[in-house]
Amino acid sequence: MADINSLEETTLQIRRDILRMVHKVNSGHPGGSLGCAEFFVALYFEIMEHNTAFDMDGKNEDLFFLSNGHISPVFYSTLARRGYFPVEELNSFRLIDSRLQGHPTTHEGLPGIRISSGSLGQGLSVAIGAALSKKLNKDPKTVYALMGDGELQEGQNWEALMYAAGNGVDNLIATVDLNGKQIDGTTEEVLSLGDVRKKFEAFGWDVLELAEGNSLEHIIASLKEAKSRLGKQKPVAILMQTEMGNGVSFMMHTHAWHGKAPNDEQLATALSENKETIGDY
């Protein structure tokens, strides 16, 4: 395992990147991005076997698909910090003709981006397709996907969940970010998800619950446990409880920062709570 202190420093720097990117253009989605920073660091800096010399085929390497594409700031920062493209390119976030659009797209050729996402409910279906492709090609690597909890209100997810279990897609780990919040309020207020674990299990999935979804050590342990359960004719799900806006005191415990940029004063406060470790772009 990588040094946990180094991973924590990377997480802090990614938080700073998210805040600065969204502030610069007064646009973007900081809440969910901050809440998933630890997950992305655990996945890209510890768990996945992947190649920064990116190619779309992704043969003989693990693949990741982001379904809730509005949290692109954390994805872009992670890819840059991991070496997929220069960190300085984060300066172009959401600008005209940038490769770093508000929702990830593929036509600009940004390394690390395998699908256009942000139209919620579609990412799991693509991940299943990639997982089936690996099985057909006798590629032993793993496919990972991340979805939001509000996204589960989209019906396509449930067709995909049924399909994956019904076809024994057992090289797939799908994580759900259970922060309990979406753009218009809590998921309970907008449309209750009920017992998510029981629903996944009823659809034939092997399910892990991760109560400490903002702990690097707990995330890494859960991802390793999930991987140990693959190859048994069932896809594996991790239900990860996170805090939207994690690491920034005034953004936590509210849905208000789902898609809202901090002003100058708020940015200064947020950055002071996340001290620079590796170096801003």
Image (spheres, rainbow, N blue to C red):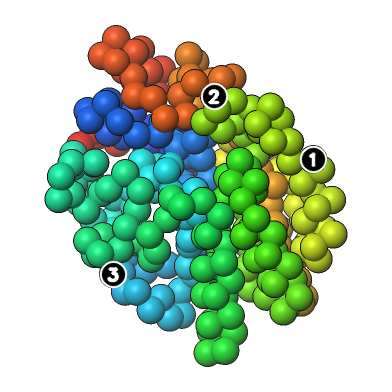
Spatial CA distance of label 1 from label 2 is 19 Å
Check disc 2 and report the residue beneath it: 255
Q: Quadrant of the C terminus?
A: top left
Q: Is residue 158 left or right of residue 50?
A: right
Instruction: Classify 10 Å Cα crowding around label 2: few (below 14), some (14-19), many (20 and above).
Output: many
Which is closer to the viewer, label 3 or label 2?
A: 2
Q: Position of residue 187 (x, y in %)?
A: 66, 33
Name the residue at 82% across, 58% down.
201
Tell me which amino acid carries mark 3: Ala
Check disc 3 and report the residue beneath it: 53
Mark earlier in primary sequence (3, 2):
3
Q: Position of residue 115 (x, y in %)?
A: 40, 63
Q: Is residue 101 left or right of residue 219?
A: left
Check disc 1 and report the residue beneath it: 194
Q: Secondary structure at mark 2?
A: loop
Tell me which amino acid carries mark 2: His
The residue at the far left in this view is: 97
